Amino acid sequence: MAIYTESEARDLLSRVLAFSKADECEANLDGSIAGNIRYARNTVSTSGVVSDVNLAVQSSFGKRVGVATINEFDDASLEKVVRRSEELARLAPENEEFMPNLGPAEYDSVDAWSESTAGVTPEDRAEAADASIAPSKANDLVAAGFLNDAKGFNAVMNSSGMFAYHRSTNVDFTVTIRTSDGRGSGWATRDYNDIDKLDTGTASAIAIQKAKDSVDTREMEPGKYTVILEPAASVTLLGNMAGNMGQRAADEGRSFLSKKAPEGEELPEDAPRNRVGEKLFDERVTIWSDPQHPEVPTAPWSGDGAPVGKTMWIENGVVKTLPNSRYWAEKTGVPYVPTAYTGGGLFGGGQQMIMAGGDASLEDMIRDTRRGVLVTRLWYIRQLDPQTLLYTGLTRDGTFYIEDGEIKYPIKNFRFNESPIVMLNNIEELGKPVRINGSMIPPMKIRDFTFSSLSDAV
Amino acid sequence: MDRRDFVKLTGIGAAGLMLPITGRMVTAAELVEAGMDFATKKSLSNVALEAATKAGATYADARIGRYLNQFITAQEKRVDNIVNTESVGVGVRVIANGTWGFAATSEMTPDAIAKAATTAVAVARANSKFQSEPVQLAPVTGAGDVQWRTPIEKSCFEVPIQDKVDLLLAVNNAALDNGANYITSVLFQVNEQKFFASTDGSYIDQDVHRLWAPFFATAIGAAGFKQRSGLSNPVGMGFEYLEPDPAEQIQVQGANVGYRYAYDMVRDAKEAGQQLQAKLKARSVEPGKYDLVLDPHHLMLTIHESVGHPLELDRVLGYEANYAGTSFATLDKWKSGNFQYGSDIVNLFADKTQKHSLGYVEYDDEGVKTKEWDLVKDGILVNYQAIRDQVHMIDQDESHGCCYAQSWSDVQFQRMPNVSLRPNAEDLSADDIIKDVENGIYIVGRGSFSIDQQRYNFQFGGQLFYEIKDGKITEQIEDVAYQSNTQEFWNSCVAMAGESDYRLGGSFFDGKGQPSQVSAVSHGCPTTRFNDVNVINTARKVG
């Protein structure tokens, strides 16, 4: 399977649409080649390459919609998939929320491709694993890690003349390094579009240091602490908050952004149903998305082919924009706010977030802390209350007590019960944002972060 | 290879539920078409085994899979999605130079299958350079030609789509007419047609069926909103599970109805609407120590997290250290022979043989006949869950038969079998358990759950919470979660109901591994009491 170029994708999708007899037709072509290597106990356990190309055709008659998919692209197969989608559409119940095709549009140019990543070989992966395993062995430690690299493309065309194409490469690396007696554990993660930026040895050195430093933990009482959350520790909580910012759920009354009437009253009929425009966070909180961001580029269009540009979600603590569907935008008379197509599967995952920060490094922030807890990452995060976005989870792989600007000693892991809304109101300092899981997140110093119990886990 | 993608089901919680879907989308009619016959599969699998052996493999297995899914979702008064998928292909696993290799193809020709086999051998050889622990397989006797099917009465795929749509819309109406403002209801129907062949002389054809029918309802009140999920269990059954049967319903006095091997989805939705209204008015729990009575639909998940996962041998040994984590239940604790996992009435067993369970098959995905074995006996840790290449590490010579791959395109590895709590020999009811509790909480349904990476500290919520005072359920309360430590919790187990209260709950999408694979697993248990557990209040004021 090849990664289709823009013109190859355009040609194939044009052939597909030529078979259509439906009122409207839209076709998505996605392909990827991904390689991975996994190791544990200082030895490679599995590795593999998965390649995949898939064509999805959506046909509609009025508000009846059918989707069919195929991975063979001769003319007979293309006609077959179009006919099958038409058959499914005729059998489908009417979908009141179906929206007609978008027309042609101009898109921002985005460069998310790296030839280095596209050219990774099995030997490169084995060497990357070895660069992590060898120092671990040399330190009498035990490494377990996973590296996944991928190249892929996405294209969409519809019968109203819209066509969009995007290609990207990506590499994700995580490593856990533990002491052989199981008393210390460290972790590191890196992700890039360009694998030349990845040095698994350097990342592993951090995990090695944390593993060694986290032996002989002391117990601290659960309670409210000033914490420094490394970007890996806050990214999931922030992503969960972003995932709960949809306009529809807010308007329907089932979100933390739903407008509530004062106690004993009812909202007037024409009152806004959501909290756009309200200041809900510390004024230093500014979060946006931008497909053209050089560190974390994304597709400049959404799944339906709508152009996606820079979108401000929260500015200076004020909620500015909520993502919505075209149906909901039209129903409520607000602009359509599409989000970048992530393609699901290999390139899937959450939406890109870019959070403003300062210039301080993690080390600077530790130096400026009189008393606090440094958190490497949070684990098993689950929602407790969708109204307050209260989440629970645990610290993991390196939790340290800071006193007078220095890391004093490792401490036992904590369970936390905290809401990102509270967290983003209790900011002491934001450091320099770094790339994490396709987003740019600063290290954060947060006061009064709630730890509710201790965990014996290492 | 097939597309592996995620279908986003909106309306389930605010952020939606992302579900892994493998396969191409097809019509419903294609789901009931017969797949390849036994003889053809046997012949194709022999091509793989011979090519692998010729290329130097000392062991090979081939899995020819046809995986069928149908997912239907309905939101409020409308059908949201009907998705039918089919995925066909073959995965070949080999040992060469003492190292595993794997390759898969969707091309069902002898040439493509032979190529996948030789690729698997090449992968094994390449990886053997970094291999420091050569594979040791526990012996297996070839099974010869075997055919097996989940004992179902009515295949889901043979039920007309209109009947399923009518059911979901009736469910939604029942909730909306009784107090819910929003509801999403779903039917997940899965059929794995998998053929396994190995150089041990096995040709095993299995036709596995599973079903799950969850719903997620929300009610909006003046001060906020509340959610309540359905109380169905995912099961290894056909559509007969969705035909209500009063004999399979267990009424707890003053509280809910529990469902055993037949579910009344419309009734549950109606009660969900009513209970949502009660939740909006319910008193918030006073935090502190309580005696907890946990219903099976809730306790199954506690078993899954605090017993199922920590006793997976690959976790214990460190193979999952970088993802799911390791385990507190280390080998030295097991070897001591006196590690008190729970109180002496706690007996936890593993199996892939319970009828109606999600794990039920006759052979696992490496051709081992399935069985039942003890994990915790009279409170003492006695065994783990292990497969052919692991049992030698715990000085055993017989695989436990719990190897599984989510599809033909993924390599099989150790997955959790059904892990269940044995009921009381005395056939007590849930009411019998509740009547002895002075100050407690009865928790129904699965809610928020979180546990650390070695499975010590956990925190679980639920769907419905009832205060128990002096042996009686008094009122519905809210904002309950309990925090405990696995060993402390199971040692606080003081009473449980008997066989007639025993029910199978389960998880339809349990994730493990990198790249991650899902599997479906059941957990059986009766209503059970735990004393003096720490309960916290999860309500919080923000913004």
Image (tube, grey):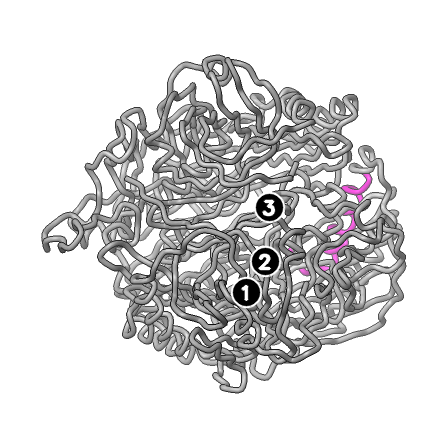
* Chain at numbered mark 3: B
| Residue marked by disc 2 | B302
> Magenta segment range?
B106-125
Contact (Cβ within 8 Å) of mark 3 with mark 2: no
Q: Are marks 2 and 1 on the same chain?
A: yes
Residue B119, can we see it? Answer: no
Asked if residue B397 is among those painted magenta in the image, a careful observer would answer no
Q: Earlier in the sequence, mark 3 or mark 1?
A: 1
Q: Secondary structure at mark 2?
A: helix
Quadrant into which the N terminus of chain A falls: top right
Badge 3 crowding class, 10 Å Cα cut-off, few under 14, some 14 to 19, many 20 or more, is: many
Q: Which residue occupies the foreground of this view, B498 or B33?
A: B498
Badge 2 crowding class, 10 Å Cα cut-off, few under 14, some 14 to 19, many 20 or more, is: many
Residue drawn at point x = 47 percent, y = 16 percent: A370
Q: Estimate the x, y position of residue A441 in percent, counting from the top left.
A: 43, 27
Contact (Cβ within 8 Å) of mark 2 with mark 1: yes
Classify A373 as above or below A455.
Answer: above
| Residue marked by disc 1 | B294
Residue drawn at point x = 76 percent, y = 43 percent: B317
Marks 3 and 2, how far apart at CA: 12 Å
Considering the whole magenta stretch, tell me its main secondary structure. helix
Residue drawn at point x = 66 percent, y = 63 percent: B65
Classify A15 as above or below A359.
Answer: below
Amino acid type of the residue tagged 1 in the rendering: Leu
| Residue marked by disc 3 | B457
Badge 1 crowding class, 10 Å Cα cut-off, few under 14, some 14 to 19, many 20 or more, is: many
